[in-house]
Amino acid sequence: MPRVAVFCGAAAPTDAVYVSAAASVGAHLAEHGVHVVYGGSRLGMMGALADSALAAGAQVTGIIPRSLHVPRIVRPGLSTLITVPDMTVRKARLLQGADAILALPGGFGTLDELAAAWGSAAHHEHAKPIGLLNTDHFYDPLLTFLNGAATAGFLAHHPHLRLENLAVVDTDPAALVDALIARAAPPPAACRTLASSRAGT
Ligand SMILES: CC(C)=CCNc1ncnc2c1ncn2[C@@H]1O[C@H](COP(=O)(O)O)[C@@H](O)[C@H]1O
């Protein structure tokens, strides 16, 4: 069962379009048999994501820092809830267990988690596909920033991370989940055998 780490806003955004997009992502991930890993909150988009994924039969793991492990914040009834010492450990744990990463609209926390995922990919710590849900073109300014950084040469020392490969971007939750799962799929058995024999295993 593929595991997808989802980053998204803990706040309830002013426009309900974001919350319904999060719910739609949860349902589509469940449809694909994905094990959802996220921040464990019941609030905002995080809550909408978890509610819909659980309702559609997905396994959902929450990873929450001790400071946020209070009834007002934790989503009860998760398949698994892991408590970690702090936000930094949580960020690492979210990334470690995942086969793919999906960022929905959010604020500081979401941006922090997304930047960490790109930062560690830049240093060859993982090659997990990253998806950006561009609801209402929320991520267009960030994509413009990345384009500018590439044009100015700030990404040139990470040639394996070409701009067009940084993320799968879509405004449609179903299309994005389909594309991300396709990228996260393990290679067919024959390729795996060839790759392992080349590696001498
Ligand atoms: C005081 C209060 C209601 C706090 C609730 N705060 C939070 N609860 C759960 N996860 C969080 C929280 N703040 C940051 N995160 C993490 O950062 C992201 C959300 O942060 P933000 O809302 O985008 O910036 C999530 O993916 C989650 O992993």
Image (tube, rainbow, N blue to C red):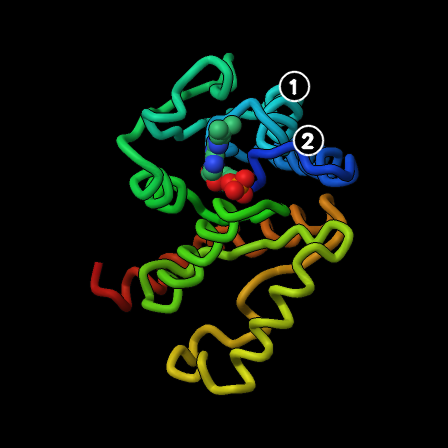
Question: Which amino acid type is marked by label 2?
Answer: Ala
Mark seen at residue 84: none
Query: Taking 195 as reference, is 1 above or below it?
Result: above
Expressed as whole percent of the image width and height from the top left, the position of residue 148 reads 58, 79
Question: Residue extending furthest front?
Answer: 14
Image quarter of residue 143: bottom right
Mark seen at residue 27: 2
Q: Is mark 2 within 8 Å of ligand 1?
A: no
Who's the residue at 65% across and 28% down the image? 48
Image quarter of residue 157: bottom left
Question: Residue extending furthest left?
Answer: 200
Expressed as whole percent of the image width and height from the top left, the position of residue 81 reads 40, 21
| Residue receiving disc 1 | 55
**Earlier residue among tags 1 and 2:** 2
In the structure shown, which secondary structural element does the residue marked by tag 2 occupy? helix
**Number of callouts in the render?**
2
Expressed as whole percent of the image width and height from the top left, the position of residue 66 reads 32, 25
- In the image, is 41 to the left or to the right of 29? left
Q: Nearer the viewer, residue 120 or 55?
A: 120
Distance from Cα at disc 1 to Cα at disc 2:
8 Å
Who's the residue at 32% across and 43% down the image? 88
Quadrant, the C terminus: bottom left
Asked if one can make out residue 147 in the rendered structure from this viewpoint, the answer is yes
In the structure shown, which secondary structural element does the residue marked by tag 1 occupy? helix
Expressed as whole percent of the image width and height from the top left, the position of residue 141 reads 66, 65
Query: Taking 44 as reference, is 88 above or below it?
Result: below
Query: Taking 76 as reference, is 157 above or below it?
Result: below
Pointer 1 with pointer 2, Cβ within 8 A: yes
Tell me the crowding category of disc 1: few under 14, some 14 to 19, or many 20 or more residues within 10 angstroms, Cα based.
Answer: few
Question: Which amino acid type is marked by label 1?
Answer: Ala
